[in-house]
């Protein structure tokens, strides 16, 4: 992404309109915010006018009754202003939070529909930043950016008008300082825009880095990478720091300039209004000079802060741009099929399937095989042969380049995704568990699956005892990614998850890591049970599984080299025979 792309024009109105379109469901809140912003500006401007009248009228004439009324008036104005401010703060934040709540839900929903390829090519840390930190920035467009700017502009315009009415000559003198502040503000704003894009990028980097290292902490410690990682982190951190310091630096330059301009303004008013006074300027009352001080503050202070608010607005827009980019990404598996089957028998056929994860890098070079309903087929082959890839295609995690995959005589493209996936259960090579109870990890919070059903299923496949032995049994919380369980145990939970969903087609990608004999037995027993009476494809690493299969598909480098039963293939003395000798013979002898 090009930096200047992201900055875009001075102000991107289309983007702005798009952000504001999200306030539609909150029209009432929107107007409450707008009105409180306007009123708080009006009250602010009312105060100097009142001060002028108090000094000129009530104070001069020493009329205590009049003074009392004026002071009461002043009090009412102040209370009004405070109330409006309060209302504004609350409702502007409410509006912002409501809008980002909606966008966030849409973003998450969008992400859930993305193809696996999208995730293969995205940094999880960056996506997390989009869904969390960037959202907050978008909210600030409402709570701290746009409406505040409107209120400030209103304040400034009214202050300028009132100054002109009180004494246009003195007002002109004050206005003479405005260009200095305006130019400084403009420069500041431009510098900040670039600086903040850098800040965002560095925050993203930091997020990704920390997230990844934390997830892979074992590797970091195992290979003594602490020093190296610390160094890398130091560099990223330093970039992050520098990016922030740049914004601080700009702030440090800008605010003194604004402050000095303000003081010069006060000096000029004192000089011309008081010292040169009446003949030259025609200022005929004390109240007016005091009112000028107030009004100048109303003119200059927002002008300084407006730059800050523009930054907030700009940062929000940059964030919105990034989030909308994800929302506009079309990376969905086309769900154009219409076939919905309540039941499938489970006949599967691959017809000359070619596929590559990356363009022009084919991984499967024309795969053809048939699995009859109810059969158990084993796929074996060296690592990287393309075994897991085959199952990634069956439920359309990825789209094939050419060929056809057919279930019960219907191409998988003709099923609705929902229907297709409802008939297939997959136990992946790396079992993923949510930070939740075992029961919820099995039912995936499907309310139609009761705990007693889960228990019954667990008994059937022989894992009830193991689960019951855990503290809390089915209510045992496995913590993030299931770290509280061994990999064999995790695999058993995944078996149960698949079994409970009662699919017509079961895919099992056996973990390559070896487990202890006891778990091995449990897994074997569970495997036998869950493959019973349904079409099963097992990517097998265990000899026992392979031998029981009605058919073995032997793969090498993205191609099927042999198909047959264990005995047939041994007799043939080909690739499988070699594989068997190299990998399994010892196992069998032992
Ligand atoms: N998400 C992916 N993006 C790009 N390439 C991938 C992806 N997943 C796998 N590959 C590549 O596809 C090829 C086949 O991988 P696959 O996972 O199917 O192997 P496998 O036979 O299951 O191996 P193993 O026995 O080690 O599990 C490998 O060369 C791998 O580099
Ligand atoms: Mg694999």
Image (spheres, rainbow, N blue to C red):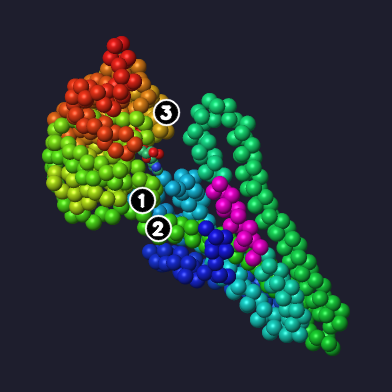
Horizontally, is 248 left or right of 405 in the view?
A: right
Q: Residue at x 15, y 40 (%)?
A: 347
Q: Are marks 2 and 1 in contact (CB under 8 Å)?
A: yes
Callout in the foreground (3, 2): 2
Instruction: Kindly indicate the quadrant of the structure image that contains residue 454.
Output: top left
Q: Are marks 3 and 1 in contact (CB under 8 Å)?
A: no
Specify whether tag 1 is near ligand 1 (CB below 8 Å).
Answer: no
Residue 23 or 248: which is nearer the viewer? 248
Image location of residue 329, percent across then percent down: 40, 58
Residue 343 or 301: which is nearer the viewer? 343
Q: Residue at x 73, y 85 (%)?
A: 168
Mark 3 closeness class: few <14, some 14–19, many ≥20 residues within 10 Å: some
Gap in angstroms between the C-alphas marked 2 and 1 = 9 Å
- Count of numbered marks: 3
Image location of residue 36, percent across then percent down: 52, 68
Looking at the image, is mark 3 or mark 1 earlier in the sequence? Answer: 1
Q: Residue at x 79, y 87 (%)?
A: 282
For the record, the magenta segment spans 189-205
**Which residue matches tag 1?**
114
Q: Main secondary structure of the magenta part?
A: helix
Residue farthest right in this picture: 275
Residue 322 or 138: which is nearer the viewer? 322
The label number, if any, that marks residue 483 in the structure image: 3
In the displayed structure, 480 sits above or below 279; it is above
The label number, if any, that marks residue 329 in the structure image: 2
Q: Are marks 3 and 2 in contact (CB under 8 Å)?
A: no
């Amino acid at each position: 992404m090009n930096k200047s792309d992201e900055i875009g024009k001075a102000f991107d109105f289309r983007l702005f309109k798009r952000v504001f379109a999200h306030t539609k469901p909150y029209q009432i809140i929107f107007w409450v915010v707008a009105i409180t912003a306007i009123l708080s500006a009006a009250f602010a401007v009312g105060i100097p006018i009142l001060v002028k009248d108090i000094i000129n009228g009530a104070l001069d004439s020493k009329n205590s009754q009049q003074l009392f009324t004026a002071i009461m008036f002043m009090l009412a104005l102040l209370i009004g202003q405070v109330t409006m401010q309060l209302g504004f703060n609350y409702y502007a934040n409410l509006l912002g939070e409501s809008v980002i709540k909606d966008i966030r839900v849409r973003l998450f929903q969008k992400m859930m529909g993305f193809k696996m390829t999208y995730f293969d090519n995205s940094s999880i840390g960056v996506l997390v930043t989009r869904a969390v930190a960037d959202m907050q920035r978008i909210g600030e467009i409402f709570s701290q950016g746009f409406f505040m700017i409107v209120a400030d502009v209103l304040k400034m315009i009214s202050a300028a008008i009132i100054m002109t009415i009180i004494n246009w000559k003195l007002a002109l003198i004050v206005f003479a300082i405005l260009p200095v502040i305006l130019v400084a503000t403009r420069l500041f704003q431009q510098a900040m825009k670039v600086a903040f894009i850098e800040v965002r990028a560095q925050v993203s980097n930091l997020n990704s880095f920390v997230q990844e290292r934390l997830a892979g902490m074992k590797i970091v410690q195992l290979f003594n990478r602490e020093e190296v990682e610390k160094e890398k982190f130091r560099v990223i951190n330093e970039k992050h720091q520098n990016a922030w310091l740049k914004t601080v630096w700009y702030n440090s330059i800008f605010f003194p300039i604004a402050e000095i301009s303000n003081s010069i303004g006060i000096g000029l008013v004192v000089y011309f209004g008081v010292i040169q006074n009446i003949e030259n300027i025609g200022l005929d009352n004390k109240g007016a000079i005091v009112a000028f001080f107030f009004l100048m503050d109303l003119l200059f202070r927002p002008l300084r802060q407006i730059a800050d608010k523009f930054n907030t607005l700009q940062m929000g827009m940059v964030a919105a741009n990034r989030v909308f980019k994800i929302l506009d990404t079309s990376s969905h598996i086309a769900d154009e099929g219409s076939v919905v089957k309540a039941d499938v028998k489970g006949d599967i056929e691959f017809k000359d399937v070619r596929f590559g994860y990356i363009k022009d890098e084919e991984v499967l070079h024309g795969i053809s095989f048939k699995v009859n309903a109810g059969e158990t087929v084993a796929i074996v082959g060296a690592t990287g042969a393309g075994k897991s890839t085959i199952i990634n295609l069956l439920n359309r995690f990825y789209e094939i380049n050419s060929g056809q995959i057919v279930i019960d005589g219907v191409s998988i493209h003709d099923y609705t995704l929902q229907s297709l996936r409802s008939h297939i259960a997959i136990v992946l090579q790396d079992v993923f568990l949510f930070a939740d109870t075992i029961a919820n990890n099995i039912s995936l919070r499907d309310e139609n699956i009761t705990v007693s059903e889960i228990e019954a299923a667990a008994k059937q496949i022989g894992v009830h005892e193991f689960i019951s032995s855990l503290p809390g049994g089915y209510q045992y919380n496995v913590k993030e990614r299931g770290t509280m369980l061994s990999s064999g145990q995790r695999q058993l939970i995944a078996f149960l998850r698949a079994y409970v969903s009662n699919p017509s087609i079961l895919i099992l990608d056996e973990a390559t890591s070896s487990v202890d004999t006891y778990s091995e037995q449990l897994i074997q027993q569970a495997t036998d049970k869950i493959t019973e009476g349904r079409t099963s494809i097992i990517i097998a690493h265990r000899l026992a599984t392979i031998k029981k299969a009605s058919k073995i598909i032997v793969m090498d480098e993205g191609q099927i080299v042999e198909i047959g039963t264990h005995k047939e293939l041994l007799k043939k003395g080909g690739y499988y025979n070699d594989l068997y000798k190299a990998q399994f013979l010892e196992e069998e002898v032992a």
